[in-house]
Amino acid sequence: MQDDEELTPEILARREFHIKNALASFALEGEYPSKECEVLLKKYVSGEIKTLDELRIRLFEK
């Protein structure tokens, strides 16, 4: 997704699908995200964080 693209309901639904699957995959291995990571992922799913690059930066900024 580019910065100027609109976050349509379809894009947000696809994000939610992929994030849920990623979290389920980690859970199968007994791994769970930190609360901070979980908050950022929810912001990405909702569209508050607009791009995957922005999510990466915010996840690894510490």
Image: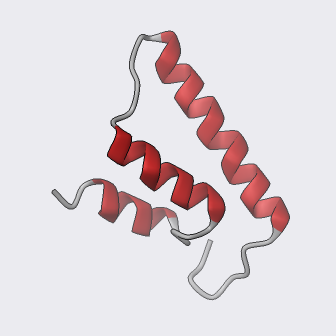
Quadrant of the snapshot with the N terminus? bottom right
Q: Is residue 61 positioned above or below 14 on the image?
A: below
Which residue is at the far bottom? 4
Left-right relation of 45 to 36: right
Left-right relation of 56 to 20: left
Left-right relation of 14 to 56: right
**Depth check: 24 or 39 in front?**
39
**Depth check: 3 or 39 in front?**
39
Q: Is residue 41 positioned above or below 31 on the image?
A: below
In the rendered image, residue 28, in percent from the top left (x then y), is placed at 52, 11
Q: Residue at x 56, y 83 (%)?
A: 3
Q: Coloring scheme of the render?
A: secondary structure
Number of numbered callouts drawn:
0
Left-right relation of 11 to 21: right
Which residue is at the far right? 10
Q: Residue at x 55, y 59 (%)?
A: 44
Q: Residue at x 37, y 58 (%)?
A: 56
Which residue is at the far left? 62
Q: Is residue 35 positioned above or below 9 on the image?
A: above
In the rendered image, residue 27, in percent from the top left (x then y), is placed at 50, 17
In the rendered image, residue 19, in percent from the top left (x then y), is placed at 60, 41
Q: Residue at x 34, y 47 (%)?
A: 36
Quadrant of the snapshot with the C terminus? bottom left
Q: Which quadrant of the figure has residue 20?
A: top right
Q: Is residue 21 positioned above or below 18 on the image?
A: above
